[in-house]
Each structure stands twice: as structure tokens, then as C-alpha cells.
Amino acid sequence: MKSLKILSMMLMLAVSVWSTGAFAQDAATDTPSDFTFVQLSDIHWGFNDPKMNPDYAGTLQKAVDAVNKLDPQPDFVVITGDLTHRAKTPEQRIKRMTEVRTILSGLKVKDVRFNPGEHDADQDNGEAFKEFFGKAVYYSFDHKGAHIIVLNTTEEEASLGEAQLQWLQNDLSKLDRDNAHLVVFTHRPLFDLYPKWGWSTKDGQKAIDMLMPFKQVTVFYGHIHQLNDYMTGHIGHHAAAPLMFALPAPGSQPKSTPVPWDPAHPYKNLGFRSVLVKADTGECVITEHSIADSLGN
Ligand SMILES: [Fe+2]
């Protein structure tokens, strides 16, 4: 009987961790204090064109090693989509998700948060992604005084969708507009960066409108495979570097084809960021880490 009770408690714990989309969760996270997190993005595991990245099989491991060397270690790692490159078959998708999850399990930090990109989710409605990385593809949690919101921009073809927008409205309704510190993660930009290349979220403006009354909001996203900083009013939107191949500046050429590898500057466009969230103001202080720097190139 006792062992049954323990088993059911373990199951409940597993379900609660699973449903937040995290590998594991921190215990005491309610007390406000400064903290750091790391954002990884656009891993595109399965991409294998050596002209764009001859180290396509080794770049992610280099990023994991570099994150593991950070001192102090971040409180959590968030991965803002496109963990896998779009697969041709369900079997290939499963294989890629298995491999990428295995490499990420080498992170010393065990609190890892996920949200999907279109490469992960648009062919099977995110089913495989949910199985591998958490049933909830949009969710929020509180961490050391900050309210963290993870949005899924792959609903209904590049949208948030009505159900998620209603959830967001409800989530935000519990917060103090003057004093809440909001940190938002998405895959696509919520604003129209360059819709011609799909660098937007169809109903992203509705989310921005909901966030706008809050005094302290910072949005971190991926998708465009390059660093980019943009303001909508007082809200900063910061695109992260990719971990497989870079893309050109918005509208700088006819098509958004990958930027070829530069042998003179290997890994120069690839990297991740760490972010210090200040407890007193909610301000986010961003440090970019290139894979080239981590290798001493
Ligand atoms: Fe991507």
C-alpha cells in the first residue's frame, strides 16, 4: 500500500514536471532576487549541409559545453524553437528529437524550458514535440520575482491562436501592471519584422497590445537566426543567434537563404545568450556568447 502511494506521488510529480515543458524544476523560486537564464535557439538538428556549417554534428555539443562552463550556472535554460530541422518522415522527426534531447540532457542545468518552432511542429501539429519536450506548448511560471511567459507561435500557421490569446489575457489579469516583471519567450517575432520572409506572427500584435500596459516587459525570440533588437513602445524584443546556420539581414537579398560558412571566421554567427534579470527593476542585462569565443577562435 505504502509503495503504491509513493508510486502515485512519483507519477504526480512526473506529470507536473512534464506538463510545464521542463526537464526538471527548481524548488524555492518565490523569493525575489537577481538571477540569470540562458537562451538557446534554432538548433536545427538534422540539418547537414557542410557549406553552411561543416560542423553541423558538433556545434550543439560545443554550445552545451560552453553553457556548462558558465560560472555561476544559470537558473534555467530556455530553448526558443526549431530544435530540429524539418523532417521528411515521422521516423526521421522522432530520430532527430531523440538525438537532440540526448545532447541537451548533458546540460548541467536541469531546469530546461522548451517552446516549438515551425520546423519542429508544423507537419504533425506539434504532436511529436509534445511527446518529447512537454505537453504544454504555452505556459507561464514565476521565478525569483519575475513572471515568465512562454508563447507558442506555431499555432494555426504562424499564429498564437484565439485559445492561447485568451489564456494569455487570463494569465496577465492576475498581475500588477506597475510592479510585475515580465519575461516573454517566443519562437517568431511578435511584431512584423519582415512578413515577406515569414518573420512575424499573424496575431502577434494582439499579444503586444495585452503586454503594453505592463511597465516592465522584455521579449526574447529566435526564428530569424541572427541578433536583432527592436522596440515596440517600451517593450524590447531581442532575437537570439542560431546554433546551426545564420540567415541574412531582413530584406537584404531576394530570399532568406542561409549565409554560407566563412572559413576565415568559423562559428562567427553561431552562439547563445545569457541574461541577468534584476530583481529590483526587472531589467534584463544581455550577454551574447559566440561559439567562436568559447573555442578561443
Ligand atoms: Fe529556425
Image (cartoon, helix red, strand yellow):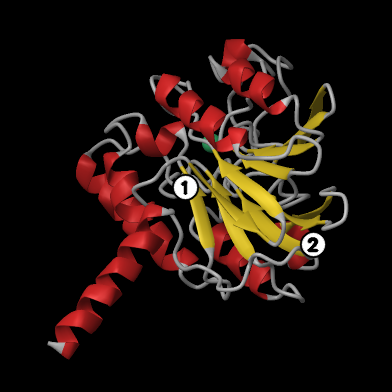
x%, y% of residue 242? 63, 44
Residue 65 is drawn in which quadrant?
A: bottom right
Camera-side residue of 199 and 205: 205
Q: Nearer the viewer, residue 86 or 113?
A: 113
Residue 92, numbered circle: none
The residue tagged 2 is 293
Q: Residues within 10 Å of mark 1 (few under 14, many from 20)?
A: many
Is residue 200 in view from this perspective? no
- Looking at the picture, how far across and down is residue 64, in whole percent? 59, 66
Q: Is residue 131 above or below residue 245?
A: below
Label 2 crowd (10 A; few <14 / some 14-19 / many >=20): few
284 lies above or below 11:
above
Mark 1 element type: loop
Q: Amino acid at mark 2?
A: Asp
Q: Amino acid at mark 1?
A: Leu
Give the Cα distance between marks 1 and 2: 22 Å
Q: Is residue 71 left or right of residue 12?
A: right
Q: Earlier in the sequence, mark 1 or mark 2?
A: 1
Q: What is the x, y in percent for residue 275?
A: 77, 55
Is the C-beta separation of discs 1 and 2 under 8 Å?
Answer: no
Relative height, residue 231 to residue 11 (above, below): above
**Residue 295 pos. (x, y %):** 74, 67
**Quadrant where the C terminus is found in the figure:** bottom right
Question: Mark 1 = which residue?
Answer: 83
